[in-house]
Image (cartoon, helix red, strand yellow):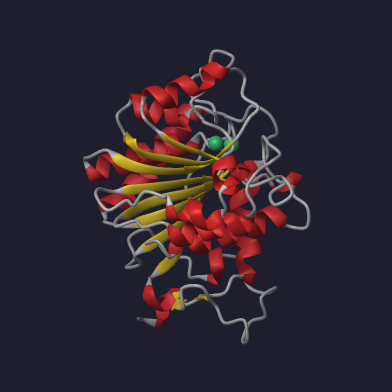
Amino acid sequence: MSQQYQPLSGREFPRFSGIKTFFRLPHVSVESDYEVAIAGVPYDGAVSYRPGARFAPSRIREASSLGRGFHMGRGVELFERLKVADVGDCPTVPIDQEQTYQRIENFFSQLTSLGKRFVAVGGDHSITLALLRSVYKAQGQKLNLIHFDAHLDTYPAAWGCEYHHGAFLRHAVNEGLIDSTRSLQIGIRGPLASGQDLDFVRQHGVDVRTVDDVRTKGLENFVASLPSFADGPTYISFDIDCLDPAYAPGTGTPVVGGLTTYETQRIFRALKIQNLVGADVVEVSPAYDSSDITALAAVDTLFEILHLF
Ligand code: MN
Ligand code: MN
């Protein structure tokens, strides 16, 4: 492995020093010879409650200064095995969603057309639809989806607007970007607006796993029950509010009774994915965070996701 994609040494430059990139990795152009890009998508124009996720990429870069490369559970030196780089932020238009979607599609299509894979750091959850459009275009086939969230994200238009942060899954299914019968949701919990909220996922055969499913029969049983993703391209979308607000207070629409960071770590380590093509971590809102609890959870999630590539 070339030295080019190694994090800046904490022994040479202490972790609080230096220009901030994800995991202190090099900031390179999209065309460089890395394998997996980490890219910020600073857009939060589609939130329904607390704003602020536009500030997540820069905050998570800063918090990732403490990120280290050896995964104890897997016994793997991540950055020896995979060329990962920070390709900077995707251009966005803070006051126009249509233009933002176009810029996300253009930026990530550039990556995917070069055969690169990526983790996008949001932004609110509305960005995932544009990300899925660009990955679908590159793959030319429907994607498997693993979706961590407190919410179903199949909600109808809000205030007459279709593309808010709680609707990406409904659009992704309706646009034919993902195979709903090869889609898994983890961390779902109520209260819902009504019992009919579940109609969409039931009609389309989405595998919905609630927090009760994770806990009632124990974590070991739960991870053993996860389906494997051996065929086709797979995408992971991680809404940080799948975690309990005690583990992720800095988010737009917190829901109590959620997962712990340890539970999501164990779920990631149990996932069997043959071909992970893209992922995102969304809905971190630094202004509502406390002592970087949420930003650090996002950093750790990035670390776990990178091992699945
Ligand atoms: Mn959510
Ligand atoms: Mn969501």
Q: Quadrant of the N terminus?
A: bottom left
Could you say which quadrant of the image residue 5 lies in?
A: bottom left
Looking at the picture, tell me which residue is in the foreground, 182 or 177: 182
- In this rendering, does residue 7 appear at all? yes
Q: Taking 23 as reference, is 156 above or below it?
A: above
Furthest residue toward left: 140
Could you say which quadrant of the image residue 3 lies in?
A: bottom left
Apparent side of residue 263 relative to residue 107 in the rendered image (left or right): right
Please provide percent x and percent y for residue 303: 51, 64
Furthest residue toward bottom: 11
Residue at 47%, 54% (x, y): give it.
223
Please provide percent x and percent y for residue 52: 67, 40
Q: Quadrant of the C terminus?
A: bottom left
Q: Taking 280 as reference, is 199 above or below it?
A: above
Apparent side of residue 279 relative to residue 211 in the rendered image (left or right): left
Ligand 2 quarter of the rendering: top right
Furthest residue toward front: 217
- In this rendering, does residue 39 appear at all? no
Furthest residue toward top: 160
Please provide percent x and percent y for residue 131: 40, 41
Apparent side of residue 177 relative to residue 72 in the rendered image (left or right): left
Residue at 74%, 45% (x, y): give it.
287
Please provide percent x and percent y for residue 196: 52, 16
Residue at 24%, 45% (x, y): give it.
139
- Number of disc labels: 0
Could you say which quadrant of the image residue 21 lies in?
A: bottom right
Residue at 68%, 36% (x, y): give it.
255
